[in-house]
Image (cartoon, grey):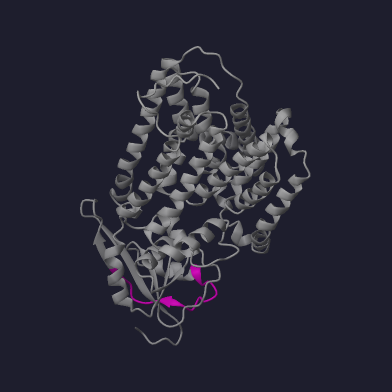
Amino acid sequence: MSADPMPRAAGRALPDAIWPLSIVAYFAFQTLYRTALGGALGLDDAQMIFDARSFEWGYGPQLPLFAWLQHLVFMVTGPTMFGLAVLKNTLLCGTVLTCYGLMRTRLDPRRAWVATLGLVLLPQIAWESQRALTHSVLATFSAALCFATIWWIARRPSLAGFVTLGLVLGMGLLSKYNFVLLPISTSLALIGFPELRASFRDRRLFLSLLIAAAIALPPYVWILNHPEIAFASAKKFDAAEDVSLGARLVGPVLATGQGVLNFLALPLLVGGLLYWRYRESKPDAPQPLLRLMLRVMVIGLLLLLIGALAVGAGQIKDRWLQPLLFLAGPALGLWLLPRLSATGLRRLQQVYAVLLVLVMIALPIHFFQGKSRNAAPFETLVPQLVAAVGADATLIAPQWEGANILYRAPQMTVLNASSDFTKPMPDGPAFVIWDGTNATTGADLLRATYPDHPDWTTGEVQQLAAPYPFADGKNFTLSFAPVVKPGDQPR
């Protein structure tokens, strides 16, 4: 371990536990902060309000583990903003602590903390994961655990390590499909490390695979039995059709390059500037962990590019890279630590602090500025809606609108027109709900939700409106209309 260039305060050194405890404290604060901000639900949280109502083997295009965990949390907290925030921030905290534990295998507590906080330089971790994401947060935590467990086994193979690997693989396989990039690319990267790969020539590895398969099997059987539901979001890849071979090759390359650039631009900029300004010439000790992390990311990106070329993907979203490129944050910290002067390391920590403060300032601005989804005044409109339709009515609504109604009025029966694939028949009075003032949207929504009932129509459209809090008096409008079936008495 190289000499520590970071100056320490005179007097008694801080206890080692302060570094991981500061990570826990930050995410505890973020949980309370998000709860206090309140507001309407965003798209991802709205999905959880519906999916986490029960345990199911499948929830449409998303794998089930996050919804299972959210259901367990809701059993304690109820379907609340606190329940949503506590799960997400627990997973984010787990990701950072796992990376800290990984860095501790090479560094003392203080330096491990500095290297770990390289995650703050990744907008997908520090900002997007706080702002919106759910399943990607779980996939990243699973990937961090997977990489750390593989590193643990590579250094000291044990039965406990192989059992843990099986559990983590099973967890990851139920988090998000892109999780598989991490274990596959790590396995391939280990080929170049004879001293590490030897630990995996062990029959206990089959135990890991058996445990993972046993955990993942039931949901994947459900996927095989419901492919039209499980792969309904495949259109997100924007796969090219009827285009030239050149365009089919160039498109995925550009999409992958753009996704990587969006993910890594900030850490590369910050790291490059600090290295240019504050670099010091010091002997560089071998860093097998850093080399492994870099190879895993390169191999994973090559695998992703091959997959993108195979399907002709026209876009690669930043969050799809998160369970792989989260390694870039601590890898950058690990690379910078022996190369920067004490002043440079102070500047790095100051950058961390500024970015974390900016996140806290930006969150309420993002949530409530203008006509954002989180600023929609459901707390005002939902009581009016319940009074207008009656507490015994069934409401048929798109996912975002329906979840916000259910969040504010949990006693109501709300059907998710976006993904309640069983499409239960409304019993008794029913209403179609949508946002906006377009009077034909309700009829279109009803036909799309119940295509086998073309004789169902909508009655008179009514509207409720309330102003956004910070949108210069602009209104958010909920429209609703009764569902009229043959033989119904007009309402």
In the depicted structure, whether residue 469 falls above or below residue 425: above
In the depicted structure, whether residue 327 falls above or below residue 179: above
Q: How many marks?
A: 0
Snapshot quadrant of residue 185:
top right
353 left or right of 178 in image:
left
Q: Which residues are magenta?
A: 448-463
Residue positioned 46% across, 24% down in the render: 271
406 left or right of 306 in image:
left
Does residue 132 show up?
A: yes
In the depicted structure, whether residue 24 falls above or below residue 354: below
Tell which residue pokes out farthest to the front in this image.
12
Q: Image quadrant for the N terminus?
A: top right
Q: Nearer the viewer, residue 351 or 285?
A: 285
Residue 64: where, in percent of width, then height? Answer: 57, 58
Q: Magenta region's main secondary structure?
A: loop
Q: Nearer the viewer, residue 433 or 33?
A: 33
Residue 377: where, in percent of width, then height? Answer: 28, 60
Residue positioned 55% across, 67% down in the render: 421
Q: Image quadrant for the C terminus?
A: bottom left
Residue positioned 48% across, 70% down in the render: 447
On whether residue 459 falls in the magenta region, the answer is yes
Tell which residue pokes out farthest to the left in this image.
473
Does residue 418 show up?
A: no
Residue 204: where, in percent of width, then height? Answer: 75, 46
Residue 103: where, in percent of width, then height? Answer: 54, 33
305 left or right of 200 in image:
left
Q: Nearer the viewer, residue 268 or 243?
A: 268
Tell which residue pokes out farthest to the top in this image.
281
On whether residue 406 falls in the magenta region, the answer is no
